[in-house]
Structure formats: C-alpha cells, structure tokens
Amino acid sequence: MTDAAHYLPEGLPAPALAEPELEAPYWEGAREERLLVQRCGACSTWQWGPEWICHKCLSSDMRWTEVAPRGRIYSYERVWHPAHPVLKGHTPFLAVLVELPEAGNVRMIGNLLGDPLQDVQIGSEVVADYEHHNDATPPYTLVHWRIAQG
C-alpha cells in the first residue's frame, strides 16, 4: 500500500511499544513487509502476542519467524463507535481476528480493507496489506487484511 492510500485517517497516534526490546522485531518486519510471529526454539510452539517465554514449555528461547502473510477470518466486528477523536466521521470500519494456518493457527487482530459494510464470511481467506507511515516519528507500518482474490 502506498503512503498516499491510508485506510485510517491521519492524526492517530503511532503504536506505542509496551516492551520495545520484545516487540520491535514484529514492527521492523512489518516495515519490510514481512509478517513475523514468535515460535519457541525448544518445542516449536507458535504464539501471539509477543512474550518472553513459551506458553507451552516455559522456555525463554523465543524466535521471530517469518510466515506467509495469509490467513482466514476467525471472527470480526463492525466498529461504529469512534474510539479516538480522529476516527469521528470514519466509522464504521471492520476489525478482524485472523487465524494464521502456517503459524499454528495463532490469531492476530487487524482492519479488514474494503467496503466497511461488506458482507464478511467467517473462514474467508485474507492476505496482509501493509500501510506505511513514513512521515511519522518514528516511522511505522500497520498490518491490515484484504480478502484474497481467486
């Protein structure tokens, strides 16, 4: 996605990292249009969101692994309430919970691009779409989702 085509209006705050050392690899991958998910080096379990230890075996050998930027809609919500003043007049929009089959079926939240009143089908295939905010300080990229074609 080009900088001229932002899904969300300008003026929203940049994502704030609660634990930059832990979360930075995901955001750096997004800037490079790569989708990264954590995977345990000890037991190979996938997990999302980022954590210092594996939820299954409690190992601290967590690795960021690139996965195919494809998934399927597990759930969705049509958002009508502007949760930030900048979103006033920019609702509704679609928030989707996307399941990533190539990453142990972990689930990520994102926006579904396209008509916000479109009919959404659970199980629909989606692909990642990267929205770059190069003029922000610091620059960042959001991962949105789009219904897969064909």
Image: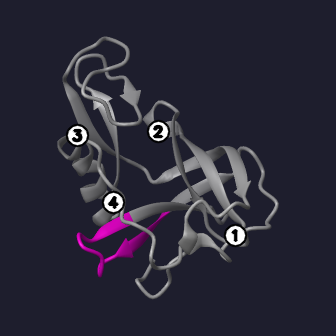
Instruction: Return the disc, 3 or 1, that comes first in the chain's sequence.
Output: 3
Q: Amino acid at mark 3?
A: Leu
Left or right: 139 in relation to 92: left
**Residue 76 spot, x, y in % from top left:** 69, 48
Q: Which residue is mark 1?
A: 91
Range of residues picked out in magenta: 129-141
Question: Could you tell me if the residues under marks 3 and 2 are in contact, i.e. CB atoms within 8 Å?
Answer: no
Disc nearest the viewer among 3 and 1: 1
Q: Amino acid at mark 4?
A: Ala
- Residue at the spot 41% in from the left edge and 35% down from the top edge: 48
Let me know if residue 69 is in the magenta part.
no
Rounded to the nearest whole Å, what is the CA distance between mark 4 and mark 3? 15 Å
Q: Amino acid at mark 2?
A: Glu
Q: Secondary structure at mark 4?
A: helix
Can you tell which mark lies on residue 22? 3
Callout 4: few (<14), some (14-19), or many (20+) C-alpha neighbours within 10 Å? many
Q: Amino acid at mark 1?
A: Thr
Instruction: Return the disc, 1 or 4, that comes first in the chain's sequence.
Output: 4
Instruction: Return the disc, 3 or 2, that comes first in the chain's sequence.
Output: 3
- Give the camera-side residue of 121 and 86: 86
- Vertical side of 77 occupied by 33: above or below: below
Tally of numbered discs: 4
Rendered image quadrant of residue 114: bottom right
Left or right: 41 in relation to 103: left
Instruction: Return the disc, 4 or 2, that comes first in the chain's sequence.
Output: 4
Rounded to the nearest whole Å, what is the CA distance between mark 1 and mark 4? 25 Å
Q: Secondary structure at mark 3?
A: helix
